[in-house]
Amino acid sequence: MIELGVNIDHVATLREARKGFAPDVIAAAKVCEIAGAHQITVHLRQDRRHIQDRDVHLLHEVLQIRLNLEMGVTDEIIDIALRIKPHTVCLVPENRLEITTEGGLDVAAQTKRLIDVVKNFHDAGVRVSTFIDPDQAQVHASAKVHADAVELHTGAYANAKGDLVLHELQRIRAAADDAQKARLELHAGHGLTVRNLAPIAQIPNLREVNIGHDIIARAIFIGLENAVREILDILNLYSD
Protein backbone atom coordinates (compact mmCIF):
# COMPACT_ATOMS: atom_id res chain seq x y z
CA MET A 1 0.00 0.00 0.00
CA ILE A 2 1.30 3.45 -0.92
CA GLU A 3 0.36 5.99 1.70
CA LEU A 4 -0.20 9.71 1.19
CA GLY A 5 1.25 12.52 3.22
CA VAL A 6 -0.35 15.88 2.46
CA ASN A 7 1.93 18.88 2.88
CA ILE A 8 -0.18 21.82 4.06
CA ASP A 9 2.60 24.45 4.12
CA HIS A 10 0.88 26.51 1.44
CA VAL A 11 -2.31 26.79 3.44
CA ALA A 12 -0.11 28.61 5.95
CA THR A 13 1.51 30.60 3.12
CA LEU A 14 -1.91 32.04 2.26
CA ARG A 15 -2.67 32.74 5.91
CA GLU A 16 0.66 34.52 6.43
CA ALA A 17 -0.01 36.80 3.45
CA ARG A 18 -2.41 38.68 5.75
CA LYS A 19 -0.84 37.61 9.08
CA GLY A 20 -4.29 36.59 10.24
CA PHE A 21 -6.10 33.37 11.04
CA ALA A 22 -7.60 32.32 7.70
CA PRO A 23 -7.32 29.88 6.15
CA ASP A 24 -7.10 27.70 9.25
CA VAL A 25 -4.16 25.28 9.00
CA ILE A 26 -5.59 22.92 11.60
CA ALA A 27 -8.97 22.77 9.85
CA ALA A 28 -7.21 22.04 6.55
CA ALA A 29 -5.29 19.18 8.16
CA LYS A 30 -8.50 17.69 9.53
CA VAL A 31 -10.16 17.88 6.10
CA CYS A 32 -7.19 15.95 4.66
CA GLU A 33 -7.51 13.42 7.48
CA ILE A 34 -11.23 12.93 6.80
CA ALA A 35 -10.52 12.56 3.07
CA GLY A 36 -8.24 9.60 3.79
CA ALA A 37 -4.71 11.02 3.98
CA HIS A 38 -2.34 8.89 6.03
CA GLN A 39 -0.24 11.73 7.40
CA ILE A 40 0.14 15.49 7.47
CA THR A 41 3.49 16.98 6.51
CA VAL A 42 4.67 20.45 7.50
CA HIS A 43 8.02 22.19 7.21
CA LEU A 44 8.95 24.37 10.17
CA ARG A 45 11.47 26.68 8.55
CA GLN A 46 14.00 28.84 10.39
CA ASP A 47 12.43 32.01 8.99
CA ARG A 48 8.87 30.81 9.84
CA ARG A 49 7.66 31.96 6.42
CA HIS A 50 4.57 29.75 6.60
CA ILE A 51 4.22 27.11 9.33
CA GLN A 52 4.58 28.50 12.86
CA ASP A 53 5.59 26.75 16.08
CA ARG A 54 1.99 26.89 17.33
CA ASP A 55 0.79 25.07 14.21
CA VAL A 56 3.10 22.14 14.89
CA HIS A 57 2.06 21.91 18.54
CA LEU A 58 -1.65 22.00 17.68
CA LEU A 59 -1.31 19.48 14.86
CA HIS A 60 0.48 17.08 17.19
CA GLU A 61 -2.39 17.40 19.66
CA VAL A 62 -5.38 17.04 17.33
CA LEU A 63 -4.34 14.73 14.49
CA GLN A 64 -5.50 11.12 14.50
CA ILE A 65 -3.07 10.38 11.67
CA ARG A 66 0.71 10.75 11.60
CA LEU A 67 2.53 14.07 11.77
CA ASN A 68 5.64 14.29 9.60
CA LEU A 69 7.84 17.29 10.40
CA GLU A 70 10.19 18.42 7.65
CA MET A 71 13.13 20.29 9.14
CA GLY A 72 16.58 21.64 8.53
CA VAL A 73 19.36 20.18 10.64
CA THR A 74 19.74 23.16 12.97
CA ASP A 75 19.99 23.12 16.76
CA GLU A 76 16.90 25.30 17.24
CA ILE A 77 14.59 23.16 15.11
CA ILE A 78 16.04 19.92 16.45
CA ASP A 79 15.26 21.04 20.01
CA ILE A 80 11.68 21.91 19.02
CA ALA A 81 11.19 18.56 17.30
CA LEU A 82 12.55 16.65 20.28
CA ARG A 83 10.08 18.45 22.55
CA ILE A 84 7.07 17.85 20.29
CA LYS A 85 8.03 14.32 19.22
CA PRO A 86 6.15 14.00 15.90
CA HIS A 87 5.80 10.53 14.45
CA THR A 88 8.51 11.24 11.87
CA VAL A 89 11.03 13.93 11.08
CA CYS A 90 12.24 14.34 7.52
CA LEU A 91 15.66 15.96 7.39
CA VAL A 92 15.87 18.41 4.49
CA PRO A 93 18.29 21.07 3.24
CA GLU A 94 17.21 24.63 3.85
CA ASN A 95 18.21 27.87 2.15
CA ARG A 96 16.60 31.07 3.37
CA LEU A 97 16.49 32.50 -0.17
CA GLU A 98 14.80 29.54 -1.84
CA ILE A 99 11.10 29.56 -2.72
CA THR A 100 10.79 25.85 -1.98
CA THR A 101 13.26 23.10 -1.12
CA GLU A 102 15.86 22.89 -3.86
CA GLY A 103 17.67 19.57 -4.13
CA GLY A 104 18.22 16.87 -1.58
CA LEU A 105 20.14 16.86 1.68
CA ASP A 106 23.84 16.04 1.29
CA VAL A 107 23.88 13.26 3.87
CA ALA A 108 27.26 11.98 2.69
CA ALA A 109 28.93 15.29 3.56
CA GLN A 110 27.72 15.31 7.17
CA THR A 111 27.44 11.70 8.27
CA LYS A 112 29.20 12.22 11.61
CA ARG A 113 26.74 14.92 12.73
CA LEU A 114 23.71 13.11 11.34
CA ILE A 115 24.57 9.88 13.16
CA ASP A 116 24.18 11.80 16.43
CA VAL A 117 21.04 13.62 15.25
CA VAL A 118 19.33 10.40 14.16
CA LYS A 119 20.29 8.64 17.38
CA ASN A 120 18.78 11.44 19.47
CA PHE A 121 15.51 11.18 17.56
CA HIS A 122 15.44 7.40 17.86
CA ASP A 123 16.07 7.68 21.60
CA ALA A 124 12.99 9.95 21.73
CA GLY A 125 10.89 7.43 19.79
CA VAL A 126 10.82 9.47 16.56
CA ARG A 127 11.36 7.91 13.14
CA VAL A 128 13.75 9.65 10.74
CA SER A 129 13.75 9.97 6.96
CA THR A 130 16.24 11.82 4.81
CA PHE A 131 15.14 13.87 1.80
CA ILE A 132 17.79 13.06 -0.79
CA ASP A 133 18.46 13.24 -4.51
CA PRO A 134 18.14 9.84 -6.27
CA ASP A 135 21.84 9.10 -5.87
CA GLN A 136 23.48 5.88 -4.71
CA ALA A 137 26.00 7.65 -2.47
CA GLN A 138 23.23 9.51 -0.64
CA VAL A 139 21.21 6.31 -0.18
CA HIS A 140 24.23 4.54 1.30
CA ALA A 141 24.99 7.53 3.53
CA SER A 142 21.39 7.51 4.78
CA ALA A 143 21.79 3.87 5.75
CA LYS A 144 25.07 4.68 7.45
CA VAL A 145 23.45 7.30 9.70
CA HIS A 146 20.70 4.73 10.52
CA ALA A 147 17.79 6.60 8.97
CA ASP A 148 14.56 4.61 8.83
CA ALA A 149 13.61 5.82 5.36
CA VAL A 150 14.72 7.87 2.40
CA GLU A 151 12.42 10.26 0.57
CA LEU A 152 13.65 10.52 -2.99
CA HIS A 153 13.54 14.06 -4.39
CA THR A 154 11.37 13.85 -7.51
CA GLY A 155 11.76 17.51 -8.51
CA ALA A 156 14.07 16.87 -11.47
CA TYR A 157 11.63 14.26 -12.78
CA ALA A 158 8.68 16.63 -12.32
CA ASN A 159 10.45 19.42 -14.21
CA ALA A 160 11.87 17.24 -17.01
CA LYS A 161 10.69 17.45 -20.61
CA GLY A 162 10.92 15.01 -23.51
CA ASP A 163 13.55 12.28 -23.26
CA LEU A 164 14.74 13.62 -19.91
CA VAL A 165 11.56 12.35 -18.24
CA LEU A 166 12.56 8.73 -18.78
CA HIS A 167 16.14 9.50 -17.76
CA GLU A 168 15.03 10.98 -14.45
CA LEU A 169 12.59 8.16 -13.86
CA GLN A 170 15.39 5.65 -14.37
CA ARG A 171 17.52 7.52 -11.82
CA ILE A 172 14.72 7.29 -9.29
CA ARG A 173 14.20 3.60 -9.97
CA ALA A 174 17.91 2.89 -9.53
CA ALA A 175 17.97 4.76 -6.22
CA ALA A 176 14.84 2.87 -5.16
CA ASP A 177 16.66 -0.41 -5.81
CA ASP A 178 19.59 0.83 -3.72
CA ALA A 179 17.21 1.75 -0.90
CA GLN A 180 15.67 -1.71 -0.90
CA LYS A 181 19.13 -3.33 -0.74
CA ALA A 182 20.02 -1.02 2.15
CA ARG A 183 16.76 -1.96 3.92
CA LEU A 184 15.51 1.60 3.94
CA GLU A 185 11.80 2.34 3.62
CA LEU A 186 11.13 4.12 0.34
CA HIS A 187 9.28 7.44 0.08
CA ALA A 188 9.10 10.03 -2.71
CA GLY A 189 8.11 13.64 -3.04
CA HIS A 190 8.48 17.10 -4.59
CA GLY A 191 6.65 18.36 -7.66
CA LEU A 192 4.34 15.34 -7.87
CA THR A 193 0.91 15.98 -9.38
CA VAL A 194 -2.15 14.14 -10.65
CA ARG A 195 -0.50 14.24 -14.07
CA ASN A 196 2.93 12.77 -13.28
CA LEU A 197 2.29 10.58 -10.23
CA ALA A 198 1.43 7.27 -11.95
CA PRO A 199 4.98 6.34 -13.11
CA ILE A 200 6.31 7.05 -9.60
CA ALA A 201 3.51 5.02 -7.99
CA GLN A 202 4.58 2.02 -10.08
CA ILE A 203 8.06 1.90 -8.55
CA PRO A 204 8.43 -1.34 -6.57
CA ASN A 205 8.47 -1.07 -2.77
CA LEU A 206 7.33 2.56 -2.69
CA ARG A 207 5.52 3.06 0.61
CA GLU A 208 4.78 6.79 0.83
CA VAL A 209 4.51 9.96 -1.23
CA ASN A 210 4.30 13.50 0.12
CA ILE A 211 2.43 16.00 -2.02
CA GLY A 212 1.61 19.59 -1.17
CA HIS A 213 1.52 22.28 -3.83
CA ASP A 214 -0.53 20.40 -6.41
CA ILE A 215 -3.16 19.36 -3.87
CA ILE A 216 -3.52 22.87 -2.43
CA ALA A 217 -3.56 24.43 -5.91
CA ARG A 218 -6.26 22.05 -7.17
CA ALA A 219 -8.25 22.59 -3.98
CA ILE A 220 -8.99 26.14 -5.13
CA PHE A 221 -11.04 24.69 -7.98
CA ILE A 222 -12.33 21.32 -6.75
CA GLY A 223 -12.11 21.55 -2.96
CA LEU A 224 -9.47 20.16 -0.61
CA GLU A 225 -11.25 16.90 0.11
CA ASN A 226 -11.63 16.11 -3.60
CA ALA A 227 -8.02 17.09 -4.31
CA VAL A 228 -6.78 14.63 -1.69
CA ARG A 229 -9.07 11.87 -2.88
CA GLU A 230 -8.04 12.09 -6.53
CA ILE A 231 -4.41 11.53 -5.48
CA LEU A 232 -5.50 8.59 -3.32
CA ASP A 233 -7.36 7.14 -6.30
CA ILE A 234 -4.13 7.09 -8.31
CA LEU A 235 -2.14 5.55 -5.46
CA ASN A 236 -4.77 2.87 -4.90
CA LEU A 237 -4.44 1.76 -8.52
CA TYR A 238 -0.83 0.77 -7.91
CA SER A 239 -0.84 -0.26 -4.25
CA ASP A 240 -0.05 -3.83 -3.27
Image (tube, rainbow, N blue to C red):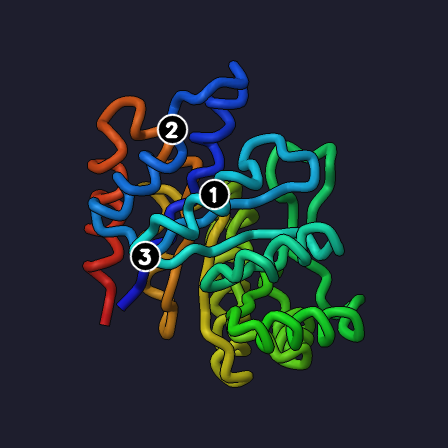
Distance between mark 2 and mark 1 Cα atoms? 24 Å
Q: Is label 2 in contact with label 1 (beta carbons under 8 Å)?
A: no
In the rendering, at what x and y percent does residue 15 appear? 47, 23
Residue at the limit of the structure toward the top, as seen here: 18
**Residue where numbered disc 2 is placed:** 24
Q: Secondary structure at mark 3?
A: loop
Please give left or right for residue 230 compared with residue 77 in the image.
left
**Residue where numbered disc 3 is placed:** 65
Name which residue lies at 39% across and 51% down: 61
Considering the image in quadrants, where does the C terminus appear?
A: bottom left
Q: Nearer the viewer, mark 1 or mark 3?
A: 3
Give the answer, above or below, for where 107 lies relative to 71: below
Name which residue lies at 66% across and 73% down: 120
Q: Using the rendered view, name the quadrant where residue 222 is placed.
A: top left
In the rendering, at what x and y percent does residue 77 appear? 67, 51
- Indicate which disc, 2 or 3, sits on the residue closer to the N terminus: 2
Residue 133 visible somewhere in the drawing: no
Amino acid type assigned to the residue bearing label 2 in the image: Asp
Q: Secondary structure at mark 2?
A: loop
Name which residue lies at 57% across and 72% down: 124
Amino acid type assigned to the residue bearing label 3 in the image: Ile
**Residue where numbered disc 1 is placed:** 191
Give the answer, above or below, for where 14 lies relative to 34: above
